Amino acid sequence: MATPNFELFQPKIPNPRAAEPRAGAGNAARRLGVLPMPSLEWNEQVARETAHLYERVKGVVPPVEWPFFAPYVKAINQLKKERNAVVLAHNYQTPEIYNCVADVVGDSLQLAREATKTDADIIVQGGVHFMAETSKLLNPDKVVLIPDIRAGCSLASSITGADVRLLRERYPGVPVVTYVNTSAEVKAESDICCTSSNAVQVVESFGTDRVICIPDEYLARWVATQTKVKIIAWKGHCEVHERFTAAELRNYREANPGVQILAHPECPPDVIGEADFTGSTSALIDFVKTRQPKKVVMVTECSMADNVAAEAPNTEFIRPCNLCPHMKRITLPKILDSLVYLREEVEIDPAIADRARRAVERMVQLKN
Ligand code: SF4
């Protein structure tokens, strides 16, 4: 069904796509030095010292795989202490990262905000590049590392700062609300950021009849169904969530009577139409923990069900498995390399950082 308060902006001549993320100059390694690589031998001592962590993941990590993970888990946890570092893990990280080496878990904004509360000197981002940038924006004096600089995001690369300037020219005076899944360069051109959990509140905070809401077309379409404000959107998509189909969800419902279907708002509108509940990753997790449904389908990145399942023993998870290839670039061996060699360091041009930080902080203040 058409949404009357929705308009999709499509430039006649698209700007070149966003550049691939690039590593910083690596000053942290020069300042703080490289450490020796710890032993990665699997032996009885490692088994003993990591047994309590295996308990957390034994439902999703087979015993045969643990001897590979455990030496990395032990080495990472030891190096975090030596470096005074924390690991932030997004809900889409694999269970051995999420449950065994992460100090903070959550969605991208929760991670960056929690990091401001630690006295750690170094943040290792278990997530993708825009998340590491957001952590750096909110923690400018800390060293922020991303274990694989190629961990990008199809939404973040769908739009550039020049695209936002073009939108402003086309719609003068209309406020620009930008999803956190964007580069610092795009945030710097925006009035305020939003997440999937607060997008409606942020859009309505201006009191205007029109708002530009970028870059996720499907999130913007969902927002338009929740507000009277006219939404002007951009045609960016999450390559993971756009793969789900309404027919697939109907099949799950038919095969599993009584199942609760929970969808992320980055899914296409017909998929959201089939869902019983739509919300951000944190809202989906809350739903499972508080309502404890007998059976659920989480229509979002595949690892999240594994991570929530470890804490929700009374719920059976039906698992459609769409993996985010960018999130999966982050692995235990790469996190260990980050802590040993202090790479890849995230740096943001100060002129961009100041403006981008303002957009993020406006949202944070609004939330409070
Ligand atoms: S799941 Fe989608 S939005 Fe999230 S990082 Fe991957 S591509 Fe980007």
Image: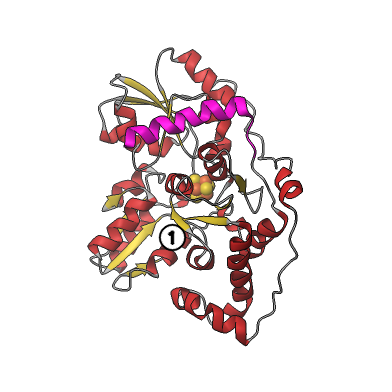
Residue 366, relative to residue 83: is it above or below? Answer: above
Residue 47 at x, y percent in the picture: 58, 83
Q: In the image, is residue 365 part of the stretch drawn in magenta?
A: yes
Viewport quadrant of the C terminus: top left
Which residue is under mark 1? 304
Q: Residue at x 70, y 59 (%)?
A: 340
Residue 189 at x, y percent in the picture: 52, 24
Q: Is residue 160 visible?
A: no
Which residues fall within the magenta stretch? 347-368
Residue 64, relative to residue 304: is it above or below? Answer: below
Residue closer to the observer: 286 or 9: 286
In this rendering, position of residue 218 left or right of residue 322: left
Residue 182, relative to residue 67: is it above or below? Answer: above
Q: Residue at x 54, y 78 (%)?
A: 50
Viewport quadrant of the N terminus: top left
Q: Residue at x 31, y 68 (%)?
A: 255
Residue 248 at x, y percent in the picture: 38, 58
